[in-house]
């Protein structure tokens, strides 16, 4: 088995350690392996379908980022966005639930742009 070194903020590391204990994982590595499998599965599913697809995308990001890059990304892909819901949640974060419809290539680009945004802490994709 290969070994990968990973640097993450202390706060996230503490969350990982708590999750390991709460969920009964053997160690941090097993949690990260599971997370990577889920992440890669999402990418494969997007790549399998070359036709028009419908997706629900859930995005969590820091409050205040909305006026910056997050909104710019959405405006850049307005041709595939059908609707979205925005609300404030705990710890100074916002959540958006986006319904998008478009070709697989454009959808992948949009999701990748959201994930690359430093203000975004989580992106979940459900393909319909």
Image (cartoon, rainbow, N blue to C red):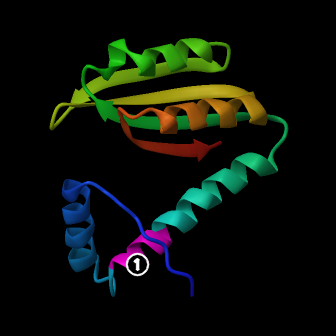
Where does the image place residue 5, in percent across and percent down from the top left?
A: 43, 70
Q: Quadrant of the C terminus?
A: top right
Where does the image place residue 22, in percent across and percent down from the top left?
A: 21, 75
Q: Please identify the quarter of the rendering in which residue 104 is found.
A: top right
Residue 52 belongs to magenta span: no
Q: Is residue 28 left or right of residue 116?
A: left
Label 1 Cα crowd, 10 Å radius (few <14 / some 14-19 / many 20+): some
Q: Residue furthest left?
A: 91
Q: Is residue 70 left or right of residue 7?
A: right
The residue tagged 1 is 29
Residue at the image point whose x is 49% and y is 14% from the top: 72
Q: Please identify the quarter of the rendering in which residue 37 is found.
A: bottom right
Where does the image place residue 82, in percent across and percent down from the top left?
A: 59, 18
Q: Is residue 89 visible?
A: yes
- The magenta stretch is 28-34
Q: Is residue 104 left or right of residue 61?
A: right
Depicted 10 relative to depicted 55: above or below: below
Residue at the image point whose x is 33% and y is 87% from the top: 26
Q: Quadrant of the N terminus?
A: bottom right
Foreground pick, 104 / 70: 70
Kind of element beneath mark 1: helix
Depicted 66 relative to depicted 38: above or below: above
Where does the image place residue 47, in percent across and percent down from the top left?
A: 76, 48
Q: Is residue 103 visible?
A: no
Q: Is residue 123 left or right of residue 38?
A: left
Residue 30 belongs to magenta span: yes
């Amino acid at each position: 088995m290969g070994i990968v070194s990973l640097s993450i903020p202390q706060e996230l590391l503490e969350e990982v350690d708590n999750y390991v204990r709460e969920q009964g994982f053997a160690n941090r590595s097993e949690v990260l392996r599971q997370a990577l499998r889920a992440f890669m599965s999402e990418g494969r599913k997007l790549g399998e379908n070359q036709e028009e697809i419908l997706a629900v995308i859930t995005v969590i990001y820091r409050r205040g980022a909305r006026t910056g890059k997050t909104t710019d990304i959405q405006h850049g892909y307005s041709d595939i966005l059908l609707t979205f819901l925005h609300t404030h949640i705990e710890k100074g974060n916002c959540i958006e639930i986006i319904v998008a419809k478009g070709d697989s290539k454009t959808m992948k680009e949009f999701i990748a742009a959201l994930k690359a945004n430093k203000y975004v802490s989580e992106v979940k994709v459900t393909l319909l």
